[in-house]
Amino acid sequence: MKAKSIIITILALAIVGTMVYAMAVKKQDSESESKKYESWKTHENAEFEFKYPDNLILSEKTYGEERYQINIKSSESLTLPIDFAIEVRPNTEKQTLQELADSSGTITPSSNKAIEEMKIDDFEAKRIVLDSHPSDLDLNDPDYIAKNSKNITIVYVIRKNLIYSFVWINKKYKQNYNSVLSETILNTFDFKTR
């Protein structure tokens, strides 16, 4: 009988110890995550906010009340450049995420298109990765198409009758771009209201 209660006590202590350890690890991960973005700037407006490294350049263009674009580009000091944009526009044609994904790459020639589902701040999204080719041609430059083709990622979210497009370049000609940093910026994106 004593052996049985000793075993139960040991098991209970092991379970409690495991739970305490798991909570400590989770707290440490949370603290290191917030320190990761400590030096980053925060861009916010009435609808959303996101973080980005302080060595990047942010610019905004407004095309009307509900249509605007935010561009984030690298400064000259980065070895891997970044070209990241957020475009917000009304969903006047009431397109679905699948229709947006299917229509990606139809305006300019594209190939190697891949579509996957994901979430942005708990909202359904579609990620499209494709090779985008120029729609024009310079007959005097035999490398024109290669030089002006790029591999891009587009992520769509539809919220409150607005289409949010997140677009970044992964590679252009022989230049790789920092797509990992673009993904990280996207992961900091937070809608202010539900």
Image (tube, rainbow, N blue to C red):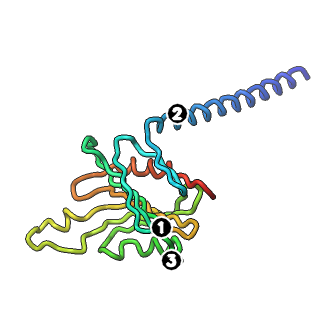
> Mark 3: which secondary structure?
loop
- Earlier along the polypeptide chain: callout 2 or callout 3? 2
Q: Quadrant of the N terminus?
A: top right
Q: Is residue 20 left or right of residue 55?
A: right
Residue at the image position 78 percent from the left and 24 percent from the top? 10
Q: Is residue 12 left or right of residue 147?
A: right
Q: Nearer the viewer, mark 3 or mark 1?
A: 1
Q: Which residue is mark 3?
A: 92
Task: State the image coordinates of residue 127 (x, y, percent, origin top left).
Answer: 46, 62
Q: Is residue 179 left or right of residue 6?
A: left
Asked whether the viewer can see residue 57, the reply is: yes
Relative to 33, is 92 above or below? below
Q: Which residue is mark 1?
A: 65
Cα–Cα gap, marks 2 and 1: 38 Å
Q: Nearer the viewer, residue 19 or 119?
A: 119
> Quadrant of the rendered structure where residue 109 is?
bottom left
Task: State the image coordinates of residue 52 (x, y, percent, origin top left).
Answer: 42, 45
Classed neighbour count for the residue bearing mark 2: other residues with Cα under 10 Å, few (<14), some (14–19), many (≥20): few
Asked whether the viewer can see residue 154, the reply is: no
Residue at the image position 66 percent from the left and 29 percent from the top? 21
Q: Which residue is mark 2?
A: 32
Q: Nearer the viewer, mark 2 or mark 1?
A: 1
Q: Residue furthest bottom?
A: 93
Task: State the image coordinates of residue 67 (x, y, percent, origin top left).
Answer: 45, 67
Residue type at mark 2 is: Ser
